[in-house]
């Protein structure tokens, strides 16, 4: 029940896009059609689901104050938490590089349509934000970190696919010229954010 609660909360209540507005650059730029948005969304799910548990292990057993006591009691006073940003980003960059190579190998068309935004997952603030939230909230186990990462990725996936579907429909709508493009996208994002606030009443 605890894992289900965390999973649902990370998708709907603590949605990376609509609750914290993280990863907006990729969200707005790639949400022009559903196929491309789905590809990027799946990549984000994978990166979040893998990097958060990995960063959890690195933080809990290497970086956190006193984490190195498993090596020797003499290291009880060692605190490497100041390296968290660098280590988290390095982990994310390594995983994104792997994802980029896999997508290029097995789906060249998707790789071409995503363009620069696929490697930019490495600096997507939603990915780094997930690791920093994990550190700040002090999740109790590797399972909690994985559940939060998976849920956050799915939440970001749902957000960008929903946005892409709406923007595809708007292509056939009579939109006033001053609102075309990013102007209307910002308005829709705000309205979707308000809509997602209704999930705050979920009780598990």
Image (cartoon, helix red, strand yellow):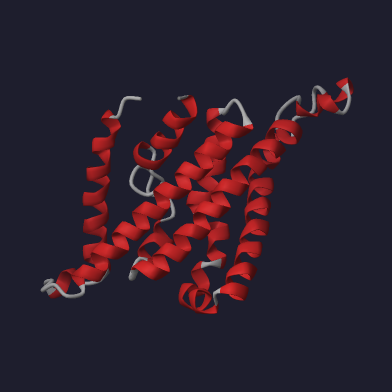
Of 102 and 177, nearer the camera is 102
For the question of whether residue 47 can be seen, the reply is yes
For the question of whether residue 135 can be seen, the reply is no
Of 105 and 145, nearer the camera is 105
**Where residue 30 sits in the image (x, y, percent)?**
39, 67
Q: In the visual, does 197 lie left or right of 52?
A: left
Q: In the visual, does 73 lie left or right of 27?
A: right
Of 39 and 31, nearer the camera is 39
Q: Quadrant of the N terminus?
A: top left
Q: In the visual, does 197 lie left or right of 23?
A: left
**Where residue 21 sits in the image (x, y, percent)?**
37, 49
Query: Which residue is found at the position 10% from the left and 74% from the top?
Result: 174
Q: Quadrant of the C terminus?
A: top left
**Where residue 106 sits in the image (x, y, percent)?**
59, 73
Q: How many marks?
A: 0
**Where residue 89 sits in the image (x, y, percent)?**
63, 51
Query: In the picture, residue 97 is in which quadrant?
Result: bottom right
Query: Which residue is found at the position 67% from the left and 51% from the top?
Result: 91
Above or below, comparing residue 99 to residue 140 in the picture: below
Query: Which residue is found at the position 63% from the left and 33% from the top?
Result: 142
Above or below, comparing residue 105 to residue 43 in the picture: below
Q: In the visual, does 187 lie left or right of 8?
A: left
Above or below, comparing residue 29 to residue 20 in the picture: below
Query: Which residue is found at the position 40% from the left and 65% from the top?
Result: 37
């Amino acid at each position: 029940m605890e894992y289900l609660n965390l999973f649902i909360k990370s998708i709907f209540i603590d949605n990376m896009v609509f609750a914290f507005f993280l990863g907006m650059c990729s969200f707005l730029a790639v949400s022009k059609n559903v196929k491309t948005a789905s590809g990027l969304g799946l990549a984000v799910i994978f990166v979040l689901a893998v990097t958060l548990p990995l960063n959890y292990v690195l933080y809990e057993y290497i970086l956190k104050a006193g984490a190195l006591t498993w090596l020797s009691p003499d290291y009880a006073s060692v605190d490497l938490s100041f390296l968290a940003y660098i280590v988290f980003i390095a982990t994310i960059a390594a995983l994104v590089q792997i994802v980029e190579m896999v997508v290029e190998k097995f789906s060249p068309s998707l790789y071409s349509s995503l363009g620069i935004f696929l490697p930019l997952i490495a600096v997507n603030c939603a990915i780094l934000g997930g690791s920093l939230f994990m550190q700040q909230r002090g999740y109790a186990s590797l399972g909690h970190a994985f559940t939060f990462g998976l849920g956050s990725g799915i939440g970001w996936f749902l957000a960008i696919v929903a946005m892409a579907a709406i923007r595809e429909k708007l292509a056939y709508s009579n939109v006033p010229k001053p609102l075309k493009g990013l102007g209307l996208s910002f308005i829709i994002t705000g309205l979707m954010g308000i809509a997602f606030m209704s999930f705050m009443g979920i009780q598990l």
